[in-house]
Image (tube, rainbow, N blue to C red):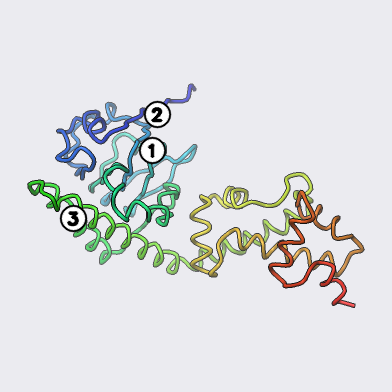
């Protein structure tokens, strides 16, 4: 089957037109109630690439959403976040849900401090199956923020309008950060299973000498094996352990290096090679930074 080419929408107005909606009240930002989309399912684009941010808030939703080649249940409803130029797949035909989608162009926030903070909201890099599932109380909070945005967009535009809407968007994103933190904590049992699986991945990576063929283990490698996005994996680990995925990789490398130094006759250069380093100097630098000793000094301390 031939792969479907995503439709590209560079402006909020273009997407409104494609969905059969009136022109947005503001050319750079819009809040769409899904109930207002009257197009038949077969006329709604199945794959889209947007030139702007999208925050999708769905509830009373029963169906599946596609991310990459997979489909994921999203029965409980919640929020998904999409950054510009990310491919978005619509729900399958015949699926009903309620909710809103917030669309805002990078130009809308470019002159505001929020523009510089967007990189801190890592959930814009999460996969669709890593959406934010919210409690009833949290749903009330999120709904009130969307309602504030709606009211402001319907207010006559004045010199305060953009600042007020941007402030509401930032409140929405800050609440989302808080609720994701709660989600990491309340799913601690599941996430600790992931920690155990990650430990097994590390062990098999070195035991099977993957490091000799693939080099150092990467965050992308671990995330792929765990069926997670790299950013979600790092944020989850930071929430549980205080260290991100790259820091966990470094800790494991040091642990394995100490094993080699203590139990094998391998030279420092050979150990660096076995761990996947291209240059022993990089290994020496990491080991020194983590232990305050060079590999040679550590080996001598064992005698």
| Residue ID at (69%, 63%) | 252
**The residue positioned farthest toward the left in the image shown:** 156
Residues under labels 3 and 2: Cα distance? Answer: 33 Å
Crowding around mark 1 (Cα neighbors within 10 Å: few <14, some 14 to 19, many 20+) is many
Badge nearest the viewer, 3 or 1: 3
| Residue ID at (34%, 51%) | 115
Badge nearest the viewer, 3 or 2: 3
Which residue was labeled with disc 3? 164
Crowding around mark 2 (Cα neighbors within 10 Å: few <14, some 14 to 19, many 20+) is some
Compared to residue 16, the image places residue 111 above or below, namely below
Q: Are marks 2 and 1 in contact (CB under 8 Å)?
A: yes
Q: Are marks 3 and 2 in contact (CB under 8 Å)?
A: no
Of residues 223 and 105, the one drawn nearer to the viewer in this rendering: 105
Query: In the visual, does 27 lie left or right of 192?
Result: left
Which residue was labeled with disc 1? 88
Q: Position of residue 82 (x, y in %)?
A: 37, 45
Q: Position of residue 151 (x, y in %)?
A: 12, 52
Secondary element at tag 3: helix
């Amino acid at each position: 089957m031939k792969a479907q080419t995503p439709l590209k929408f560079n402006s909020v107005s273009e997407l409104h037109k494609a969905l059969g909606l009136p022109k947005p009240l503001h050319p750079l930002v819009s809040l769409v109630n899904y109930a207002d989309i009257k197009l038949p399912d077969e006329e709604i684009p199945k794959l889209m690439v947007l030139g702007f941010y999208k925050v999708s808030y769905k509830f009373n939703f029963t169906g599946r959403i596609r991310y990459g080649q997979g489909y994921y249940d999203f029965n409980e409803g919640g929020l998904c976040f999409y950054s510009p130029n990310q491919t978005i797949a619509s729900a399958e035909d015949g699926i009903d849900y309620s909710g809103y989608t917030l669309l805002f162009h990078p130009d809308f926030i470019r002159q505001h401090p929020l523009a510089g903070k967007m990189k801190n909201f890592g959930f814009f890099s999460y996969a669709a199956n890593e959406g934010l599932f919210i409690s009833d109380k949290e749903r009330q909070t999120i709904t009130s923020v969307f309602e504030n945005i709606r009211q402001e967009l319907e207010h006559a535009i004045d010199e305060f309008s953009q600042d007020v809407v941007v402030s509401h968007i930032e409140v929405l994103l800050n609440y989302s950060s808080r609720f994701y933190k709660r989600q990491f904590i309340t799913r601690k049992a599941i996430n600790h299973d992931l920690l155990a699986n990650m430990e097994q991945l590390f062990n098999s990576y070195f035991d099977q000498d993957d490091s000799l063929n693939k080099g150092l283990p990467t965050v992308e490698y671990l995330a792929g094996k765990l069926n997670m996005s790299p950013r979600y994996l790092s944020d989850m680990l930071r929430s549980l352990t205080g260290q991100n995925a790259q820091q966990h990789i470094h800790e494991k490398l040091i642990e394995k290096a100490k094993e080699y130094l203590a139990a094998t006759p391998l030279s420092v250069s050979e150990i660096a090679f076995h761990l996947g380093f291209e240059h022993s100097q990089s290994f020496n630098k990491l080991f020194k930074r983590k232990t305050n000793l060079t590999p040679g000094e550590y080996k001598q301390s064992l005698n």
